[in-house]
């Protein structure tokens, strides 16, 4: 293939390179703050790429880069799998969504290097945008204008934002320690942003974000330890084992709290409350809080009257999280070991009433740090999913259901998969096969990117995509820089419990920083 040779003046070449940098900076700013900016920035990058011409040179740069060809083959897999997909409309929509895998990589790899000393400012643009977003989140938090902590992320998905914040922390630490080591002011600013973003991550109440943050620290610490003398390695290894087993013991103690049984003698349940109201009992219901059965000793007439006397929320209505008030009240009182009658209700404090109104189901959640609460909730979901087999309304339990459904879909078509557009059809098939109690909805997907790849493209397709993601950073040795390691740890772990690249924010985050670490160059 031949292209006409277009000679650009030096001035015009410089203008195009700065537009190129501006487009990348705008994309970095848009990642945590605006889907609109994500789209506009990529349009600017593409139009600038076209206007710059120089296609013969760009063609050579791109096709001489084996790592880039392998990475962009991910998009080729999507195109090929469209031809045996039954849902072409959704398949074409998926191709359009994932176009940046090819297009942004083509632009970055085929373009001339960025102006000298400009690449280092892209992480600052990204971190600056996160800082601005954090101010919006703080405003929401302080005004109390939210019903769920996911609403603290006003512009993009709560989980995606938490992953971005994690990466920003390590980008700023690297900037402080290496990039701006000789510039005291910028170095201190970078440290300040790293601290601020760590605090922001805690404020977001994202368990996924904190677990990924902990995993990045663990991996980076392990790499540093391996460089130490043998004696120090042994000491740190022993300390790591102690931390691991300490954490395991802690999780087992939480699991014990979830699974303990306190109401052992339920054969002789009393039938009337102290006021003479007949109790409702359902001892076969497996739900427990702190070992106490939830659905025994319920005197609804008494509870309804007492609750409506002290709360603005109707007993038969919904709380601020959209959940039935009375069922949250049952669970909360059970967690205190109280009967659900007037006598038991009298022992609730004003703080307890507010907790129920906020959707808190266990009295200990008002006492524990939020991360312990979130771990306990996850274990509670797991336990009751095991015994009741109904994941409805519980995010972790629903993920377990989706994973099983995905495995059934993969089992049906293991070699080629279902095709680019058939993720919904595959999910529906899998949920039917496992006799799931869930009513299928359009958003129900595997919530695991690896399983999604296997469902759509078969096991060979999934393995090729993993190879296409892993080979370029290894070939280009980007693992020599710890922010790059942090990014790939974030990507690898987030793909275990999320369809990370199925949204525009997630895909743009992935493609932008993949190119930033692996392919983006600047003049030396």
Image (cartoon, rainbow, N blue to C red):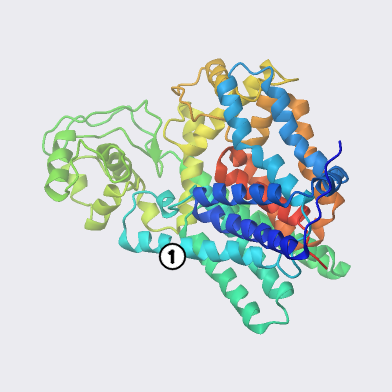
In the image shown, does 332 or 122 lie closer to the viewer? 122
Residue 295 is left or right of residue 16, and the answer is left
- The tally of labels here is 1
Q: Residue at x 41, y 41 (%)?
A: 291
**Quadrant position of the N terminus in the picture:** top right
Q: Residue at x 68, y 17 (%)?
A: 84
Q: Residue at x 48, y 64 (%)?
A: 132
Q: Can residue 75 be seen in this snapshot? A: yes
Q: Can residue 249 be seen in this snapshot? A: no
In the structure shown, which secondary structural element does the residue marked by tag 1 occupy?
helix
| Position in image of residue 324 (x %, y %) | 28, 37
| Position in image of residue 163 (x %, y %) | 58, 53
47 to 368, vertically: above or below: above
In the image shown, does 382 or 181 lie closer to the viewer? 181
128 to 408, vertically: above or below: below
- The image quarter in which residue 441 lies: top left
| Position in image of residue 168 (x %, y %) | 61, 62
**Quadrant position of the C terminus in the picture:** bottom right
In the image shown, does 93 or 440 lie closer to the viewer? 93
Residue 163 is left or right of residue 471, and the answer is left
Q: Residue at x 58, y 40 (%)?
A: 498
In the image shown, does 517 or 360 lie closer to the viewer? 517
- The image quarter in which residue 411 lies: top right
Other residues around mark 1 within 10 Å, as few (<14) / some (14–19) / many (≥20): few
Residue linked to disc 1: 135
| Position in image of residue 489 (x %, y %) | 70, 51
């Amino acid at each position: 293939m031949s292209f006409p040779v277009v000679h650009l003046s030096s001035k015009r070449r410089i203008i195009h390179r700065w537009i190129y940098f501006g487009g990348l900076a705008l994309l970095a700013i848009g990642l945590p703050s605006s889907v609109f900016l994500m789209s506009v920035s990529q349009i600017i990058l593409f139009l600038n790429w076209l206007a710059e011409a120089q296609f013969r040179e760009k063609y050579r740069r791109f096709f001489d880069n084996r790592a880039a060809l392998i990475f962009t083959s991910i998009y080729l897999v999507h195109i090929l799998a469209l031809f045996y997909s039954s849902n072409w409309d959704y398949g074409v929509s998926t191709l359009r969504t994932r176009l940046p895998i090819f297009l942004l990589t083509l632009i970055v790899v085929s373009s001339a290097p960025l102006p000298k000393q400009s690449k280092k400012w892209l992480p600052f643009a990204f971190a600056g945008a996160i800082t601005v977003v954090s101010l919006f989140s703080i405003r929401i938090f302080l005004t109390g204008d939210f019903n769920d902590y996911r609403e603290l992320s006003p512009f993009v998905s709560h989980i995606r934002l938490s992953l971005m914040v994690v990466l920003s922390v390590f980008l700023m630490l690297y900037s402080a320690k290496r990039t701006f080591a000789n510039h005291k002011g910028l170095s201190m600013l970078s440290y300040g942003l790293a601290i601020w973003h760590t605090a922001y991550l805690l404020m977001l109440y994202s368990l996924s974000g904190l677990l990924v943050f902990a995993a990045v620290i663990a991996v980076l610490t392990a790499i540093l330890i391996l460089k130490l003398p043998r004696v120090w390695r042994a000491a740190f290894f022993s300390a790591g084992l102690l931390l691991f087993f300490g954490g395991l013991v802690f999780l087992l103690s939480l699991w014990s709290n979830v699974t303990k049984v306190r109401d052992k003698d339920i054969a002789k349940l009393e039938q009337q409350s102290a006021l003479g109201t007949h109790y409702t009992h359902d001892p076969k219901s497996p739900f427990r809080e702190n070992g106490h059965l939830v659905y025994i000793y319920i005197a609804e007439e008494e509870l309804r009257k007492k609750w409506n006397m002290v709360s603005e929320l109707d007993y038969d209505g919904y709380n601020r999280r959209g959940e039935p008030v009375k069922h949250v009240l049952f669970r909360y009182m059970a967690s205190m070991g109280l009967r659900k009658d007037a006598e038991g209700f009298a022992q609730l404090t004003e703080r307890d009433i507010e907790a129920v109104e906020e959707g808190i189901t266990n009295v200990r959640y008002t006492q524990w740090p939020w991360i312990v609460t979130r771990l306990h909730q996850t274990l509670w979901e797991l336990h009751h999913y095991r015994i009741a087999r109904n994941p409805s309304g519980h995010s972790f339990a629903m993920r377990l259901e989706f994973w099983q459904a995905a495995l059934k879909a993969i089992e049906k078509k293991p070699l080629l998969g279902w095709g680019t557009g058939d993720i919904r059809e595959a999910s529906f098939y899998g949920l039917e096969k496992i006799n799931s109690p869930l009513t299928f909805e359009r958003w129900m997907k595997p919530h695991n990117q690896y399983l999604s790849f296997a469902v759509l493209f078969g096991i060979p397709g999934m393995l090729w995509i993993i190879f296409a993601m892993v080979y370029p950073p290894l070939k280009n040795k980007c693992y020599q820089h710890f922010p790059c390691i942090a990014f790939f740890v974030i990507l690898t772990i987030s793909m275990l419990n999320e369809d990370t690249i199925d949204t525009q924010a997630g895909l743009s985050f992935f493609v932008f920083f993949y190119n930033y670490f692996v392919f983006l160059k600047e003049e030396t």
